Image (cartoon, rainbow, N blue to C red):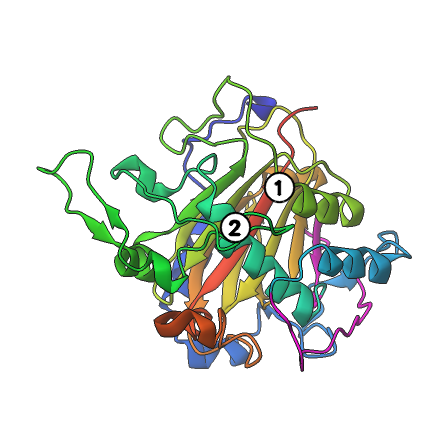
Amino acid sequence: MANDLDAHAKPPARLREVYKEYQKLKPSALDDSPNLIQFDNDARPSNDQVVEDKSVRLPNELREILSEFLSEHTDHSRNGIPFELKQTPVYQVPNLPGLLIYPSLLPPQIQLSLLDRLLHRDISNPAHKTNVHLHHHVPYPQPKDPEAPVSRASYFDPSSSNLEFPPKDPTLHKPLSTPQFLSKKLRWCTLGGQYDWTAKQYPSSTPPPFPPDLKSLIETIFPMRAEAAILNLYSPGDTLSLHRDVSEECGAPLVSISLGCDAVFVCGLGEEAAVLRLRSGDAVLMSGESRYAWHGVPKIVEGTCPAWMEGWPGEEFGEWEGWMRGKRVNLNVRQMFA
């Protein structure tokens, strides 16, 4: 465990106060909250709590990196969704050294392609465990085309609608159906290193490989190795309590990518706190002193999924068309070893 920090420790009182304040705040009041850091469509910050960090530069070949990522996965046509690269500045929060914000980093096409890979492919990989595995036996859908370069075996496919998830202990839990699994029960999935949420540690066994296309994308943009990730799925009303990520064996940065509905993100060290409104396509890098900052999500903002994403996964998936309208998907990636 990094720096011998206690993964079970309680966050400072000041951070708990800030978290509760935004948990109770009505979504309609967010725009008028003077201490909330948020960015407009041109990636301009709402207040002076952040400043541009000119020492951090995105790769000069970012367009080529993103284009290559798209070319690796052509299952779904994204006609009508423009590939526009904004090249927005990277911002830092001065009172939290190492906390960097990349507003509007990922264009719409990249975000949709990420959703395809994460939710049609990676949650269907038996090597990637979910919260549902804790109490249920999890069945797996069959690939649509096993010969395809990126085979899709999706729980969203109509052919998977009758899968059954029997409980490990029928006296404690009821069976689940695919609709129950996708609508509310699926809360997280681990990629690469399979984190044990109960023991708050990584198993000593060799972890499954991190998805290579996601690994390449992360590592060419951010100063870290992608070895483990937690994919969180939220609905309005869901929260993530304040915590620190301290189980990795090194202090390499941690990166968080947001997709779907807006989220309020609280981050802090001691008495210093920053509250961010994260939108779809934003990324946050926790590095330096802020690598071990307390952080949590007190609110998911309903009705804020971008219009071009609302229909995901699309009409070919029948009842699941529009699933993203009420969801936030967060990919939180970290390096496990020095």
Instruction: Identify the amino acid type marked 2.
Output: Arg
Q: Taking 112 as reference, is 91 left or right?
A: right
Instruction: Identify the amino acid type marked 1.
Output: Pro
Q: Taking 2 as reference, is 43 left or right?
A: right
**Figure quadrant of residue 111:** bottom right
Whether residues under marks 1 and 2 lie with C-beta atoms below 8 angstroms apart, the answer is: yes
In the image, residue 99 lies in the stretch drawn in magenta? yes
Residue 87 has which mark? Answer: none
Label 1 vs 2, first from the N-terminus = 2
Task: Find residue 61 and report its horizontal and vertical position in percent.
Answer: 89, 57
Q: Which residues are magenta?
A: 76-104
Please tell me which residue lies in front, 225 or 240: 225
Please tell me which residue lies in front, 6 or 209: 209
Task: Find residue 114 and report its horizontal and vertical position in percent.
Answer: 61, 58
* Rendered-image quadrant of the N terminus: top right
Please name the residue that numbered disc 1 is placed on.
211
Identity of the residue drawn at 70% across and 68% down: 104
**Figure quadrant of residue 65:** bottom right
Where disc 1 sits, the SS reads loop
Please name the residue that numbered disc 2 is placed on.
121
- List the single residue furthest toward the right: 60
Please tell me which residue lies in front, 45 or 158: 158
User: From mark 1 to mark 2, how far is it between C-alphas?
Assistant: 10 Å
Q: Can I make out residue 328 in this image?
A: yes
